[in-house]
Image (cartoon, helix red, strand yellow):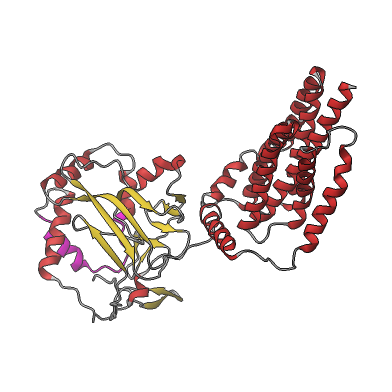
């Protein structure tokens, strides 16, 4: 008789765990609105049901545990063999979550793997909690948290998917009360089903929520979208928005062009407080076409706070540079945006530390641009620490040492950043050679050109458009 009662308790725990998993995982999947397809969703649900059943079998007896282990190994092996080629797609799924470019088909396969593994793990967790009467309330709390967070995060969360879980949760409360977990246990299903049915019938057709709770849910949803679902193309800052909106036709296409009269916008954009002079950069363009600056290289994006890509972040922002030799010094700065704008954040090149409210998901790309997953709004503020150059002999020696260092990236960087287009007049080349004739190093040449520009040229806003086929500087 004792064995029969034990078997009933195991059966009840396994059935409830299966309902919890199906309801919780499918509700989360519908809230995430991740396109897995009907086959993917059923596979996810069955993964959790299967592990809950195996846990029940293992709890029956020692032979049952051995049989459950064998069945688990066989079923897991069959799934792995059938989908061996798609295991690597998990990387594409996580890349998509982090905002990087990823193959859509591979990301869907990776999503199925992720949610399937989550479902299987929850099947084990829910069975363990529900088998112990004193831990059943914890299982209900986890399920309720999953359902409420899914509903708060997304309007696409399925009400239908919550029904099995709600019925199971109501049954758990009855079973933790006076109802014994024996042959009389199924009688709790009738009032549980009726209670859930009445609750659903009382729900209005629209989404009626308490405004403070809805606002909190919207904030949570916004943060979730910024951190885990930022895959769309962003709009970067351009000076064309601030009175330098010049365009022309090149090879039949209308493109942004340098030159022509400018009418800069005088409205303040940001307030910057810093320990000293600092150059902030926003949008980075690396290729000069003769009439504009463009960026033709693909750029991967990364979440700034993602420690798994810490090495990438340090390399992109050259965070390993040192101020010990006097070529750089550390500077603290705070920035407050005074107007709405694009997603671009303005920071120095050698960024060592960046701090902003964690409600804002901050990203960077392989070019060194820093940006939000949304458009910047007036009042957004952040602080930073960066290394800024100290122009003088120490920086000159650092450049000389850098030229002689064995850096396998140097040749590629030199080719990328020193390429010149056609259309540059011979006189400009001759002038440059004359200005730098006495220079002994790359730093000396750059300094000589900078000094010449300071002494001989002035910025003007009423310049003419350059002739077709002639570069802007010439």
Q: Foreground: 292 or 66? A: 66
Indicate yes or no whether the magenta region holds residue 421.
Answer: yes
What quarter of the picture does the N terminus occupy?
top right
**Residue ID at (82%, 30%):** 9
Q: Is residue 67 toward the left or the right of residue 98 in the image?
A: right
Q: Which residues are magenta?
A: 417-437
- Residue 66 lies in quadrant: top right
Q: Position of residue 287 (x, y in %)?
A: 35, 60
Query: What is the count of numbered marks?
Result: 0
Question: x and y percent of residue 281 in the render?
Answer: 31, 60
Residue visible at 57% across and 58% down in the picture: 221
Place of residue 417 in the rendered image (x, y in percent of width and height, measured from the top left): 31, 55
Please tell me which residue lies in front, 357 or 369. 357
Q: In the picture, residue 125 is in which quadrant?
A: top right
- Indicate the quadrant containing the C terminus: top left, top right, bottom left or bottom right: bottom left
- Residue depicted at x 80% and y 33%: 53
* Residue 381 to residue 303: above or below: below
Viewer-proximal residue among 120 and 106: 120
Which is more toward the observer, 303 or 106?
303
């Amino acid at each position: 008789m004792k064995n029969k009662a034990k078997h009933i308790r195991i059966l009840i725990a396994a059935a409830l765990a299966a309902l919890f998993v199906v309801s919780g995982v499918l509700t989360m999947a519908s809230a995430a609105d991740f396109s897995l397809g009907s086959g993917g969703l059923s596979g996810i649900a069955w993964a959790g049901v299967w592990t809950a059943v195996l846990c029940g079998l293992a709890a029956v007896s020692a032979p049952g545990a051995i049989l459950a282990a064998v069945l688990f190994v066989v079923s897991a092996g069959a799934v792995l063999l059938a989908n061996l080629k798609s295991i690597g797609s998990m990387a594409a799924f996580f890349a998509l979550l982090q905002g990087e470019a990823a193959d859509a088909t591979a990301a869907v396969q990776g999503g199925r793997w992720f949610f399937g593994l989550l479902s299987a793990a929850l099947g084990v967790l829910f069975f363990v909690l529900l088998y112990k009467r004193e831990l059943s309330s914890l299982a209900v709390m986890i399920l309720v948290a999953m359902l409420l967070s899914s509903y708060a995060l997304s309007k696409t969360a399925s009400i239908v998917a919550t029904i099995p879980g709600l019925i199971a949760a109501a049954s758990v409360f009855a079973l933790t009360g006076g109802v014994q977990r024996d042959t009389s246990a199924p009688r709790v299903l009738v009032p549980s089903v009726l209670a859930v049915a009445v609750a659903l019938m009382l729900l209005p057709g629209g989404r009626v929520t308490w405004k403070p709770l809805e606002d909190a849910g919207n904030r949570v949803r916004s943060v979730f979208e910024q951190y885990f679902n930022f895959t769309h193309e962003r709009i970067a800052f351009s000076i064309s928005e601030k009175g330098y909106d010049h365009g022309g036709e090149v090879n039949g296409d209308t493109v942004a062009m340098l030159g022509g009269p400018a009418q800069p916008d005088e409205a303040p954009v940001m307030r910057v407080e810093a320990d000293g002079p600092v150059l902030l950069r926003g949008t980075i363009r690396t290729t000069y076409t003769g009439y504009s600056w463009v960026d033709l290289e693909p750029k991967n994006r990364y979440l700034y706070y993602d420690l798994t890509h810490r090495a990438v972040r340090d390399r992109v922002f050259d965070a390993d540079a040192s101020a010990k030799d006097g070529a750089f010094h550390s500077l603290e700065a705070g920035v407050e945006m005074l107007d709405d704008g694009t997603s671009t954040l303005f920071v120095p090149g050698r960024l060592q530390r960046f701090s902003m409210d964690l409600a804002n998901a901050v990203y960077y790309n392989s070019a060194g641009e820093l940006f939000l997953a949304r458009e910047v709004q007036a009042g957004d503020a952040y602080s930073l620490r960066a290394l800024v150059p100290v122009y003088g002999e120490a920086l000159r020696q650092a450049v000389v040492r850098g030229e002689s260092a064995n850096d396998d990236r140097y040749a590629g960087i030199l080719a990328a950043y020193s390429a010149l287009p056609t259309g540059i007049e011979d006189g400009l080349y001759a002038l440059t050679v004359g200005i730098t004739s006495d220079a002994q190093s790359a730093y000396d040449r750059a300094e000589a050109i900078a000094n010449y520009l300071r002494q001989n040229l002035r910025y003007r806003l009423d310049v003419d458009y350059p002739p077709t086929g002639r570069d802007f500087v010439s």
